[in-house]
Amino acid sequence: MDTETQRKWDAASRTLDLFAWGDDQRLGPHKRRLFRKIRGATLMVAAGTGNDFKFFPPGQHIIAIDISPQMLERAAQKAATYQGTLELRVLDVCALPFADASFDTVVTVCTFCSVPRPVVGLRELYRVLKPGGQLLMFEHVRSKIGPFGIFLDLMTPLSRRVGPDLNRDTVGNVQKAGFRLRREENVYLDIIKIIEAVKE
Amino acid sequence: MYFIIGDYVAGMLIGALTALSVRAVVWPGMDMVMAMLLGMAIGMVIHLGLGLVLAPLLGMVYTMAPAMVIGMYGGMLFGMRDSMAAGSRTLTAAASVGALFGFLVVLGIQLYDRALHGAVVDAED
């Protein structure tokens, strides 16, 4: 387990929900639309404080993992209100204990901005997905628009100390991990994206 | 509607505060490069501080993206303007120019967002 990352996100768990209201109102409908595609055995990576559980369609069987025990402590209450099965486990996405081809769907929300070795983590997701399984991602990435991209590069050394990297090429990383890109959609500028990929 | 108005109010507030702060520390005749760098630094501090305060109400990235352009690039422009003694004569005028700059940036970003919105790749079966 990456204890440095764990400590960082344990600390962040105290303030994460303070920033949620505006994002929930503006981004929630997009997340709900993406999560409608969930099918079969589902793994959610980086559940955080469970703020996104409310956007899941009811009746699913979902295992939600996070590297931070304190995040999941906060998530437990929200998981209890979900109308389906939601199991919480403290795990590192780079070393999953699941057998190959265990899941039909993997869901991530603002996850691969924070995983220190994103391609390693994505390869692990590729391994645990069944052939034909889908990866549904709601992520913020580095902008290709000049002024935004430069700013995100400048801010990343600072943001990384307390939270995520702001300049990840997550679409590229998904493809490097072996997935076939099924859909890429801009939600806000080219910074917040829905990324859907498939294991073939 | 709340978010549309909120985005413009936030942008105008950050613009006005940046313009006023830059004006307070940059004097006419100051080396222009120094003034631009100072303006950028002031703008970054203001946009980060105000951005964090407004983010819970408007959303993190929806606040930070325009705030960054207004603070960082606006701070440079205001610094250059003030060092050339081409700036506003009164504080009210300086704040108005800052607010106008903030408004225009938010407008531009909203139009750009509309143009970019939607599928970039769509290979669904």
Image: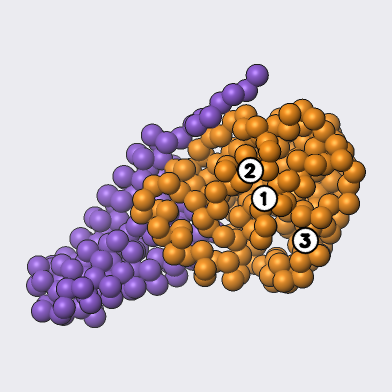
- Callout 2 touching callout 1 (CB < 8 Å): yes
Q: Colour of chain B?
A: purple
Residue type at mark 1 is Val
Q: Is residue A145 left or right of residue A185?
A: left
- Color used for chain A? orange
Of B26 and A118, the residue lying toward us: A118
* Residue on which disc 3 sits: A67
Q: Determine the residue positioned at 77% across, 55% down.
A: A94
Q: Position of residue B33 (x, y in %)?
A: 21, 73
Q: Which mark is residue A184?
A: none
Q: Which type of secondary structure does the marked residue at label 3 adopt?
A: loop
**Colour convention:** by chain
Residue B47 % position (x, y): 40, 65
Residue nearest the viewer, comparing B8 with A150: A150
Up-down: is B54 above or below A107? Answer: below
In 3D space, how far apart are the residues under numbered discs 1 and 3 (Cα atoms)?
17 Å
Question: According to the image, label 2 marks what residue?
Answer: A176
**B45 vs A121: above or below:** below
Q: CA distance from mark 2 to mark 3?
A: 23 Å
| Callout 3 amino acid | Ile
Which badge, 2 or 1, is on the more N-terminal residue?
1
- On what subunit does the disc labeled 3 rest? A
Q: Which residue is mark 1?
A: A119
- The structure residue drawn at horizontal position 43% and vertical position 46%, both measured from the top left corner, is A144
User: Which quarter of the rendered picture does the N terminus of chain B lie within?
Assistant: top left
Earlier sequence position, callout 2 versus callout 3: 3
Residue A28 relative to residue A156: left or right: right
Label 1 chain ID: A
